[in-house]
Amino acid sequence: MTDLETSLPAVTFTPGRWGDPAAAMHLSDSVRGALGFLGIHQPGPAPVALAAVVVADSRLADGTALDALRSAVSEQHVALGHDARVAHLRGFSTPDLLRMRAGDGADAPDVVVSPATHDEVVAVLAACVAHGLALCPFAGGTSVTGGLAPRRDRPTVSLDLRRMTGLLAFDEVSQTATLAAGTRLPDAERLLGELGFELGHFPQSYEGATIGGCAVTRSAGQSSAGYGRFDDMVVALTVATPIGTAQVGTAPKSAAGPDLRQLFLGSEGAFGVVTSVTVRVHPLPTVRRFSGWHFPDFASGAAAMRALAQATVRPTVMRLSDEAETGLNLANPSAAGASSVSGGCLMVVGFEGDEADVACREGYVGARLAASGGTELGPEPGEAWRVGRFRGPYLRDPLLDAGALVETLETVTWWSNLDRLKDAVTAAVTEALGAQGTPAVVMCHISHVYPTGASLYFTVIAKALDDPLTQWGRAKQAANAAIRAAGASITHHHAVGTDHRATYLEEIGEVQFAALRAVKAALDPTDVCNPGILIP
Amino acid sequence: MTDLETSLPAVTFTPGRWGDPAAAMHLSDSVRGALGFLGIHQPGPAPVALAAVVVADSRLADGTALDALRSAVSEQHVALGHDARVAHLRGFSTPDLLRMRAGDGADAPDVVVSPATHDEVVAVLAACVAHGLALCPFAGGTSVTGGLAPRRDRPTVSLDLRRMTGLLAFDEVSQTATLAAGTRLPDAERLLGELGFELGHFPQSYEGATIGGCAVTRSAGQSSAGYGRFDDMVVALTVATPIGTAQVGTAPKSAAGPDLRQLFLGSEGAFGVVTSVTVRVHPLPTVRRFSGWHFPDFASGAAAMRALAQATVRPTVMRLSDEAETGLNLANPSAAGASSVSGGCLMVVGFEGDEADVACREGYVGARLAASGGTELGPEPGEAWRVGRFRGPYLRDPLLDAGALVETLETVTWWSNLDRLKDAVTAAVTEALGAQGTPAVVMCHISHVYPTGASLYFTVIAKALDDPLTQWGRAKQAANAAIRAAGASITHHHAVGTDHRATYLEEIGEVQFAALRAVKAALDPTDVCNPGILIP
């Protein structure tokens, strides 16, 4: 058994470029050929060197506010320099990347503060309240929805949580682990693996993402069918708010009022700073078996996934690429463009556990997939996907370099609405880009399933125009409108940030927004915590 | 296969006496013998006839407020009579029952209003806001935590939701059903059963409980290991609040901010009235197989349950009685006092599904239970439990009649804390009653398990003193303090109401309470909705 996931190191991303620089990808000839069909023949503009990114003067270069921050964490952990501010500037949405490549650092935070403990976070929060500063937590820096772009109407502190790392408590009997918020996922798996346990949370941002970031954005990993979403894994959180610290979560489940864990999960830093998270863990699997299945079309594959999602016995991983994604072999990014599956749709099915458990589930699931019209392709396509499971985002930078516009977006709805939603989003994005003279390839997969519905994850590629920000802005707006019109949720696991905020507010309506705004006003009365994120 | 659950009719309870009057139970000779050991030889005082229960004059007997309520629902659905007010007076906690038996109806609602639609609920709410009335939703009336006892500092409307019944929408593909809040669980199962589906929510209050009540109290049913708690089943709710109607829940799961379904689930009517609930359903099982397992002691049985709760493949039902409960045969109320299991602990394990699914899980689970030291007893003890699963509460009235004090209480904690919690609560209740000269039998079972922890459900029997309210009050206070001191949650599925409120506020702490209070103030600015319930 290859334990690729747990052997990957945590990576400090270069600002504006995804992942481990040593693992950068190059486009295959067949992808380059496909780009030709989209009219992409000229490389895009070369990115501006990081040292040349232009930032505004820090509004915190001297004075009592800076002193207060320094006394909260000590002087060496307060950074005002150009490089530190650029490194905490933005995440990885298309607008984020395009601005960074253009050298635009206008919205850099004014100062970067790196606490080491919960008490230091409390002290930083107090300094921000006292001096009218905004505070934006930063950990993995992998947001793709503008989650690192609070309102800049006052000096902004980027609170770097990556010194707050490690396993703070472990309960082998209850199978729970308390991890500091800044612990990156590969570090969490390494620490747990030494004890014979695993968290099993594998989002595509795995190499950079952190425990705290996964909590406040309701992340979902590729093994969600087996181990649940991140919000399913969280049993308790410690949150530093401007009015005090909350210990949230007393027991696995309870009837003691509303489940307030679910108020802080997904709060995106708007109510305070999550400083540690207690998660459910499980013994390291002794068996991991992945395989590929072929379905004649997306509809039959989706119906088979639905049957499994609604059954009691399920695989650990389920993922279905549509015809376009299967054709471009995006399920295997290292070999993208050279699909071994001819026509139809590829489904990846994976099992993890002990031999008895996996054998029990494999037999049941295999029989159901075959009965649903699937053909087993053997382990190769499944293992190829597993080994390449974090490689997808590495394709983005070389595609931008090659002159392409490339972005992903995702949504979730009930099973009965899935086809309609897929068609509506595909049509909206295709039309919005086509109307600008740039025909698009729109691909889709299902990677998270529930008994009552599933997510849809879209990848869009088109030729970049001279003003790609406006170009993509139109497509994104069309996609958001299509998602809302179809009654789906604006995001399944990318979160709201600033990019989805307007559509999100339409989705939840006035009464729910009144509840959110009231919580915000009660816990953060002077709007210090991520102003403008999630809540305008 | 006997479908006992779905063939049981919904029952309108007689105020102050549990369940279907035609199904009333009598104590077996062996229970009567056991009562002798507790010094119980004289029957308790006979209950006052319902017609003789003394209620205060209605504060709404005439005037514009009454006119407003009548115009909201029509005159025939506004009741001011003695019997209607007594029928909406209280639930089934020990203080509730003792007061009712004593003829004390001082806290009867001033008027009973029965809307038929969501819009009529909105109109009643508006009338309450306009005229300064309090509104207390009533449906099953099965609260055991003072959930029907709002503050009486202003005239109180009991909002009877039982005209709001039925299946409002059904989505066979997504396997979801929208049910009106007043639909009682047996009616929900009958309506779904006609379509080939099942909800699978079987709390002990099944015959009387309603869909809306299960939502706002975070009910948990006996099949929670297989089908989840009620809050797991809910995918959407419609809530009428004083500031407007909220449609909560867009998709199965989402990263669009906090999961606000979890704010209304468990809200106990404090934020508004839940008028309909959309739940996940599943095809009617074609196989139901229950069996008994014997474990030498509670510790080994609990360890076996933990191993299953932490595995991927699980039964649908798991329940472990401790030595005392096994000895009194409380898992089989119809035969209580004559246990067929000699010594040790009885575990009931049940599987529901289709033959392939059940066969897969049964083999895996059986091997694990045997490896954990269990001995299979065959189907009889399991089937006896299944057939009698709603009979337990019927024992209470004859026990009170016989001069006993009898009550249940429950809590939940992490697995590593379970033994300590069980010992602490048992000791606290035993000492509090023993100190009053009434030795108690304290029995316990585990009936809800999670990967990280489990619930504990206690049944307490002692001789009733002349002032049983004060007597039980001391025991309950000791139990609450022991639960808090052990760091457990004050309730796993009975909810907070007024009886658990003080301990609940200690459990969640000031920051979380500030969030709750802010939501209450935003959604119910004049404190119309269940004042004093959950939030003081």
Image: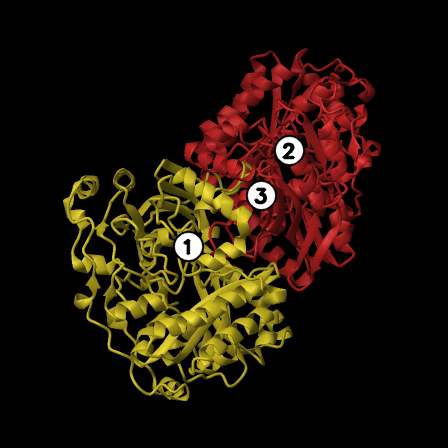
Chain colours: A red, B yellow
Tag 2 subunit: A
* Whether residue B264 is situated above or below residue B45 in the rendered picture: above
Q: In this view, does A475 lie to the left or right of A275?
A: left
Tag 1 subunit: B
Front disc: 2 or 3 = 2
Amino acid at circle 3: Leu
Residue density around tag 2, few if under 14, some if 14–19, many if 20 or more, within 10 Å: few
* Whether residue A381 is situated above or below residue A484 in the rendered picture: below
* Residue A18 visible to an observer of this rendering: yes
Q: Is mark 3 on a helix, strand or loop?
A: loop
The quadrant holding residue A474 is top right
Residue where numbered disc 1 is placed: B217
Amino acid at circle 2: Ala
The residues bearing labels 1 and 3 have C-alpha atoms spaced at a distance of 21 Å
Residue where numbered disc 3 is placed: A265
Residue where numbered disc 2 is placed: A130
The answer to whether dots 1 and 2 both sit on one chain is no
Image position, residue B501 (x, y; %): 44, 57
The residues bearing labels 2 and 3 have C-alpha atoms spaced at a distance of 27 Å
**Residue at 15% of width from left, 46% of height from top?**
B62
* Whether residue B8 is situated above or below residue A388 in the rendered picture: below
The answer to whether dots 1 and 3 both sit on one chain is no
Residue density around tag 1, few if under 14, some if 14–19, many if 20 or more, within 10 Å: many
